[in-house]
Image (cartoon, rainbow, N blue to C red):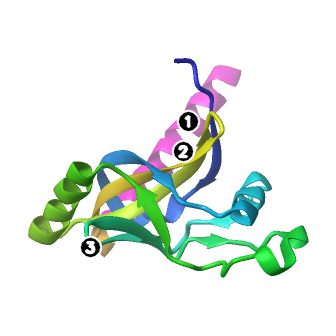
Amino acid sequence: MGESLKTIAQNKKAYHDYFVEESVEAGIELCGTEVKSVRQGRVNLKDAWCAVDGGEMFVNGMHISPYEQGNLFNRDPLRVRRLLLHKREIMRLYGLVKQQGYALIPLSLYWKGSRVKVQVGLCRGKKLYDKRQDLAARAAKRDIQRAMKERSRE
């Protein structure tokens, strides 16, 4: 199978604001100038989220900058884009979102061969104390690494 995965953009804010329970790979429906802009890495997933409407999944708030040479073929940078998943997969995720209060958040955008794929996370929101706890744990880990490095120099 040996397909190369090359990351285009990541949503680091999602990992800060949510606990990621599960992730799913989905295709995305793009027009030609959007693909060219994605090739240049001009994508922002910061405030993006997914919604299920009429048995189809859509990504909202994903910003793909207009392609410079695209002129009249350029689309709206914030337009709603359809995600490509099997109907059964969409219904399973929709059921979890409705019943258990999860959110569907795009975590990353990457190339898989010649196709653009989106990694959609089934996420649960973090409370403020969870975020503080994560920051404290990260700071403690950094301090330990620093101390180990100082110790190995002596």
Q: Is residue 45 magenta?
A: no
Q: Residue at x 27, y 72 (%)?
A: 127
Which residues make up the magenta segment?
A: 130-154
- Spatial separation of the CA atoms under disc 1 and disc 3: 50 Å
Q: Does residue 131 appear anywhere in the picture?
A: no
**Callout 3 amino acid:** Gly
**Residue 65 falls left or right of residue 51:** right
Location of residue 82 with respect to 39 vertically, above or below: below
Name the mark nearer the viewer: 2 or 3: 3
Residue 118 position within the rendered picture, expressed as x and y whole percent measured from the top left:
49, 52
**Callout 2 amino acid:** Arg
Mark 2 in CB contact with mark 1 (< 8 angstroms)? yes
Residue 131 position within the rendered picture, expressed as x and y whole percent measured from the top left:
37, 66
Mark 1 in CB contact with mark 3 (< 8 angstroms)? no
Q: Does residue 128 appear anywhere in the picture?
A: yes
Magenta stretch: helix, strand or loop mostly: helix
**Neighbour class for label 3 at 10 Å: few (<14), some, many (≥20)?**
few
Q: Callout 3: helix, strand or loop? A: loop
The residue singled out by tag 2 in the image is 142
**Neighbour class for label 2 at 10 Å: few (<14), some, many (≥20)?**
few
Which image quarter: residue 57?
bottom left
Q: Residue furthest right?
A: 69
Q: Is residue 140 magenta?
A: yes
Location of residue 27 with respect to 70 vertically, above or below: above
Q: Callout 2: helix, strand or loop? A: helix
The residue singled out by tag 3 in the image is 54
Picture disc at residue 145? 1
